[in-house]
Image: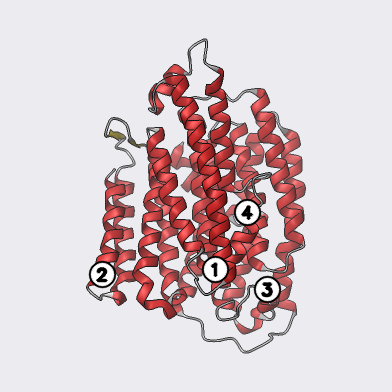
């Protein structure tokens, strides 16, 4: 609860700085504030508590994922200075929206009541709608914002309908009471329909097949920093929330439900990877890559033993690699007007450090040792085999091999082709964010217990 209040206070402070014309102080103060909030959040790790009649629940799960969200937001805010340098008059708006987005993310993993869950998802979604359409002079950005708004509203409607059915079956929004009542011998059929609708709504949010069709267009049309936010922070939040929804309400995942998850998981991996092979636009490629990673993350729902720890590890590995990759993409494609792969030609010669970081992040996403992406997939595969779903692991291994094809298409462009034009001087912040993110990825890859033991 203290974390949530502090985040909202920081967002308001950003807006006040605009009024006082302290624009240059907004980003450094925000980063310092987020670091302080991260310390505050970690301090609550061994102090589980509930607030406001169980509306907010502080647990190891909420603290671990909230800390991850705060770290990702620090990286995104740090990248904002150079990305929005031509829009200094609006810098406070962009930063404040990202901070309020973070408050929605924290609420989504800290809820103890379905009304708080819905409030959190709406705060996060509305922030993303605004950011997606924030480039008002771009038709693609306007299209992305409108498309995301329409699809997101549709998904929110499905979620709300599911919540209503669960309330109708249980007579309460409280997660603890729902969990206790779900153990009764006879449950109304609409309780299970409500759970299905909640799951469908969250599958829209993580862009899993067949609810993925909005992602490529929205990712491509949105400003690159917004795409980075959606690809890393928003996807991780949605997956963690789906996991908490199904476990906190003590929902018995039947064999039929698991088979549906198996089909969606395999379909997401396969469709995402095959479509990514055809892309020449780096943002569309990463959009389809994200769809395939959503399929990998869904494997967590098939096993119960240490599933929360595996989910935290996979999301951390994926998000850190994504942040590192987008740090390079933001620099290379700045002022280019597009994010085509040919922009990366010869980057290995013109800027070997950023080329190495992008290569490492792509290798992590592909699941190559020593990066965290390999161990994240290895843990998921092990648990899924133990749960008796060998076919999913076989499909996942095949798809991991396929993914190497489109990741290496970009890597080869950086190291085997000549630069098309002279590279501009790289702002220091791009180096800092890219290098720190990929070093964190490598550290948790070499020492996976650092993350796995958090939720043990």
**Disc 3 designates what residue?**
340
Name which of mark 4 and mark 3 comes first in the sequence. 4
State left or right for residue 56 relative to residue 261. left
Q: Which one is in front in this view, the residue at disc 2 or the one at disc 4?
A: 4
Name which of mark 4 and mark 1 comes first in the sequence. 4
Q: Nearer the viewer, residue 103 or 18?
A: 18
Q: CA distance from mark 1 to mark 2?
A: 25 Å
> Circle 2 sits in a helix, a strand or a loop, which is it?
helix
**Residue at x 72%, y 75% (from the top left corner):** 413
Q: CA distance from mark 4 to mark 3?
A: 20 Å
Name which of mark 3 and mark 1 comes first in the sequence. 1
**Residue at x 70%, y 63% (from the top left corner):** 407
**Disc 1 designates what residue?**
224
Above/below status of 107 relative to 408: above
**Residue at x 24%, y 71% (from the top left corner):** 19
Find residue 148 and report its image quarter.
bottom right
**Disc 2 designates what residue?**
17
Q: CA distance from mark 2 to mark 3?
A: 37 Å
Q: CA distance from mark 4 to mark 1?
A: 16 Å
Give how far across and how far down residue 117 sits, in percent. 42, 39
Q: Mark number for residue 214?
A: 4
> Circle 3 sits in a helix, a strand or a loop, which is it?
loop
Find residue 202 and report its image quarter.
top right
Above/below status of 32 relative to 87: above
Residue 379 visible to an observer of this rendering = yes
Instruction: Please report contact status of discs 3 and 1: CB closer than 8 Å, yes or no.
Output: no
Above/below status of 324 relative to 423: above
């Amino acid at each position: 609860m203290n974390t949530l209040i502090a985040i909202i206070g920081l967002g308001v402070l950003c807006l006040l700085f605009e009024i006082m014309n302290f624009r240059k102080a907004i980003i450094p103060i925000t980063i310092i504030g987020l670091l302080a909030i991260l310390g505050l959040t970690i301090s609550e790790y061994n102090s589980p508590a509930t607030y406001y009649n169980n509306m907010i629940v502080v647990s190891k799960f909420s603290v671990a994922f909230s800390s991850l969200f705060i770290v990702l937001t620090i990286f995104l805010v740090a990248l904002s200075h150079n990305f929005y340098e031509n829009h200094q008059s609006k810098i406070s708006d962009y930063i404040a929206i990202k901070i309020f987005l973070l408050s929605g993310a924290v609420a989504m993993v800290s809820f103890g009541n379905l009304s708080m869950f819905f409030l959190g998802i709406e705060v996060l979604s509305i922030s993303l709608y605004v950011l997606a359409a924030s480039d008002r002079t771009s038709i693609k950005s306007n299209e992305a914002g409108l498309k995301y708004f329409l699809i997101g509203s549709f998904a929110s409607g499905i979620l709300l309908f599911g919540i209503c059915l669960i309330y109708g079956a249980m007579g309460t929004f409280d997660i603890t009471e729902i969990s206790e009542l779900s153990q009764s011998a006879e449950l109304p059929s609409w309780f299970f329909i409500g759970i299905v609708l909640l799951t469908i709504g969250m599958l829209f949010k993580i862009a899993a097949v067949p609810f993925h069709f909005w992602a490529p267009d929205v990712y491509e049309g949105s400003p690159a920093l917004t795409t980075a936010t959606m690809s890393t922070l928003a996807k991780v939040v949605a997956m963690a929330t789906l996991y908490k929804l199904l476990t906190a309400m003590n929902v018995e995942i039947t064999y039929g439900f698991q088979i549906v998850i198996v089909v969606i998981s395999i379909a997401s991996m396969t469709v995402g990877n095959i479509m990514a092979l055809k892309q020449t636009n780096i943002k569309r490629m990463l959009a389809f890559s994200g769809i395939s990673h959503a399929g990998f993350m869904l494997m967590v729902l098939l096993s119960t033993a240490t599933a929360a720890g595996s989910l935290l590890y996979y999301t951390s590995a994926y998000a850190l690699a994504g942040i590192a990759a987008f740090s390079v993409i933001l620099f290379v494609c700045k002022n280019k007007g597009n994010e085509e792969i040919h922009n990366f030609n010869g980057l290995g010669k013109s800027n070997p450090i950023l080329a190495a970081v992008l290569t490492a992040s792509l290798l992590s996403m592909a699941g190559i040792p020593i990066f965290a992406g390999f161990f994240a997939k290895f843990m998921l595969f092990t648990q899924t085999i133990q749960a008796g779903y060998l076919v999913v692991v076989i499909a996942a291994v095949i798809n991991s091999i396929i993914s190497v094809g489109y990741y290496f298409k970009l890597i080869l462009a950086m190291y085997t082709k000549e630069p098309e034009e002279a590279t501009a001087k790289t702002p220091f912040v791009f180096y800092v964010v890219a290098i720190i993110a990929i070093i964190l990825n490598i550290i948790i890859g070499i020492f996976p217990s650092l993350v796995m033991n958090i939720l043990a």
